[in-house]
Amino acid sequence: MVVDDLGDETVDRLFHALADTTRRDILRRCVRGELSVSRLAEGYPMSFAAVQKHVAVLERAGLVTKQRSGREQLVRTDPDAVGRARRALDELESAWRGRVDRMARLLADDPETEENDTAEGPER
Amino acid sequence: MVVDDLGDETVDRLFHALADTTRRDILRRCVRGELSVSRLAEGYPMSFAAVQKHVAVLERAGLVTKQRSGREQLVRTDPDAVGRARRALDELESAWRGRVDRMARLLADDPETEENDTAEGPER
DNA sequence: CTAACGTACAACCAAATGGTTGTAGATGAT
DNA sequence: ATCATCTACAACCATTTGGTTGTACGTTAG
């Protein structure tokens, strides 16, 4: 049942969200989920709106959730988030080792697939 | 001390390089290191120069190396690359669990250190 | 030698990113 | 009720990104 397939765009968003020092810092600081956006924003040398945007990026990537509490919005990093990032790496790495590749080949029972698969674009 | 520190910019470049489907695909295809840049480029619906740039991004992130062979430039994925990415995640995750965080707080004698987290328990 | 190939790099362009300020809607405190 | 706070969101701007084409240069094949 193909549970573990993170789509390309999902992985794009995941890694993109992680590719920024401020956002990684936000992740570290929101494990406990007790910080509101404005509270968070006090910690950075930028405007409230800028931090708001960073949180939005993290949220779209599924790394963070917001929970309303009165007029505040508490930010909490999703405990499963690193797991998903790690799985994305794992998928890369298994292609690395050729395992997934080889498996697919076996299932397609192509006897001579050793070499010339490289010219096929993934895009479409 | 503190040997294992990937600097912020290094991690930025790492994750940014991984945050693109085409670049991840290049990584998967270059494990064997037998593909030249132009050979690689044949597989994608974009110009040679565009692929060249993607390879450059991967190279700056340390995910790939180029080795000259005659007039060709063979691209090879660095086997340790995923390891470094994983370590970056590990560093995040340990902050997650509070360990690094706690250490940093102590060293910076941040007033926020006062919390009910006396025990060392990694669960919460 | 000359032609073809593989690469490098510059110049250019559209779109996305990361930041700003400003405005407006909810909510809580006085 | 009024005021201060927290959030959301739009408009704007500079820089970066991801792509293009064109040019130049080294290397291999005829």
Image (cartoon, coloured by chain):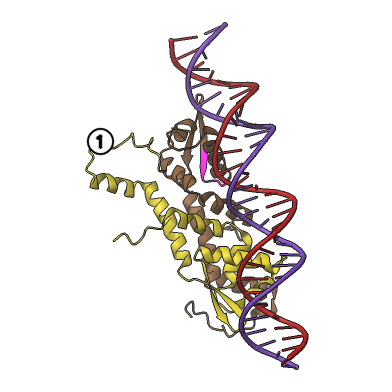
Chain colours: A yellow, B brown, C purple, D red
Question: What residue would you read off at disc 1?
Answer: A112
Q: Residues within 10 Å of mark 1 (few under 14, many from 20)?
A: few
Q: Amino acid at mark 1?
A: Glu
Give the residue drawn at x 58%, y 85%: B116
The residue at 51%/46% (across/down) is B63
* A88 and B110: which is toward the camera: A88
> The numbered mark 1 sits on a residue in which chain?
A
The residue shown at (58%, 69%) is: A28
Residue B124 x, y percent position in the rendering: 48, 80
Asked whether residue A65 is in view, the answer is yes
Residue B9 in percent (x, y) is at 63, 54
Q: Which residue is found at the position 48% from the left and 65% from the top?
A: A82
Q: Position of residue C25 (x, y in %)?
A: 63, 77
Residue B60 relative to residue B111: left or right: left
The answer to whether B114 appears left or right of B98 in the picture is right
The image quadrant that residue B31 belongs to is top left
On whether residue B118 falls in the magenta region, the answer is: no
Q: Is residue B1 visible?
A: no
Across and down, in percent, residue B25 comes to 44, 45
Q: Is residue B64 magenta?
A: yes
Side of A100 relative to A56 (left or right) = left
What type of secondary structure mainly makes up the magenta span?
loop
Front-most of residues D13 and A5: D13
In the picture shown, does residue B124 fall above or below B62? below
Question: What is the span of residues highlighted in magenta in the rendered image?
Answer: B61-65
Quadrant position of residue A1: bottom left
